[in-house]
Amino acid sequence: MVRDKLLEFARDFGIDARTRLGTRVDDVREDADGSFVVISTDLATDEKITTSARFLCVTCGILTHDQWTLEERGVHVDRHFGGQVVQAAKLNGVDCPLGTMDLTDKKVVVLGSGSFAAEAFEAAERAGCDDITVVGRPRYRLVLPFSRQYTVSAIANAPFVPWSIRMRIALRYVKQNFYRPCNLLHWAPSGDPGDMDFSGQCNDAYFRLAYEASSSAWSTTSSASATGPHTSAPATRCRATSSSARRDSSTT
């Protein structure tokens, strides 16, 4: 159904006629006038194709190749650690197994608070883990629910209003309606609102599970102090902490 709709959209706007599949990009060069020349190869016929364009958009896909290793990310895994470490994309050519693992009665730590981290968060919860801790570096961008990204975008793009005032309004809106009810106030961007970027990560999982945890008097803590009561959790417990992690990654 979704595929049919996408194909219909592509046909309606002539995108299918301008799309070349089964093609490998061999080289890209920029000419003196600022235009780009793309040299590619048709994998079915081995034909060389030259394409010129004024604009070039590179969307190579992060899931198609190995990501940085843990060592390259500055993450040290103690040799005494007995758990399993996975990455949100591929690690040594192997896709992330988190969605197919049985995590019943397991504890999961997710390093990072970006889109892949949110997907790992959801996958771990669906896999039945007992406890999830999200560790992320201090942010200057907002983490938003998908359902409210356009509301915050409208605030951020309001005309004739200084950027710092717009960001103060956006931050207050998100704190009041989402961070506070979900016990995630420590996740709010720190520093001057004028330095904030509203186009942060959008994912409902953080807020849904954190709100369920908060409503059920489960444990939600920050790196500095507890922001919710510590009680025995009848199901998955959710925690979110802030640290100085160098890059986002996901680890169990």
Image (cartoon, grey):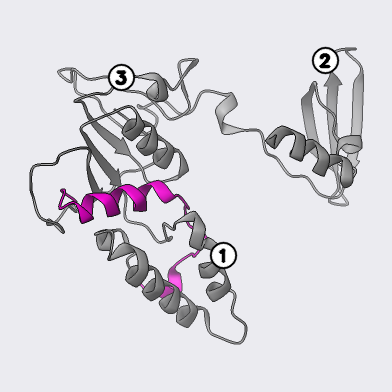
Residue positioned 38% across, 24% down in the render: 98
Which image quarter: residue 27? top right
Q: Can you see residue 249?
A: no
Discs 1/2, front: 1
Numbered disc 3: secondary structure:
loop
Mark 3, Cα crowd under 10 Å, few <14 / some 14-19 / many 20+, is some
Mark 2, Cα crowd under 10 Å, few <14 / some 14-19 / many 20+, is few
Residue 133 in picture, x, y percent from top left: 24, 40
Q: Identify which amino acid the numbered label 3 is placed on.
A: Asp
Residue positioned 88% across, 45% down in the render: 12
Which one is in front, 186 or 210? 210
- The residue singled out by tag 2 in the image is 43
> Which quadrant holds the N terminus?
top right
Q: Can you see residue 196?
A: yes
Mark 1 or mark 2, earlier in chain: 2
- The residue singled out by tag 1 in the image is 150
Q: Are marks 2 and 3 in contact (CB under 8 Å)?
A: no
Numbered disc 2: secondary structure:
loop
Mark 1, Cα crowd under 10 Å, few <14 / some 14-19 / many 20+, is few
Q: Which residues are magenta?
A: 192-220
Q: Does residue 208 show up magenta in the picture?
A: yes
Mark drawn on residue 102: 3
Residue positioned 90% across, 43% down in the render: 14
Compared with 71, 36 (above or below) is below
Outermost residue, bottom side:
160
Residue positioned 40% across, 29% down in the render: 72
Q: Does residue 48 show up magenta in the picture?
A: no
Question: What is the C-alpha distance between the residues marked 1 and 3?
Answer: 36 Å
Which one is in front, 163 or 123? 123
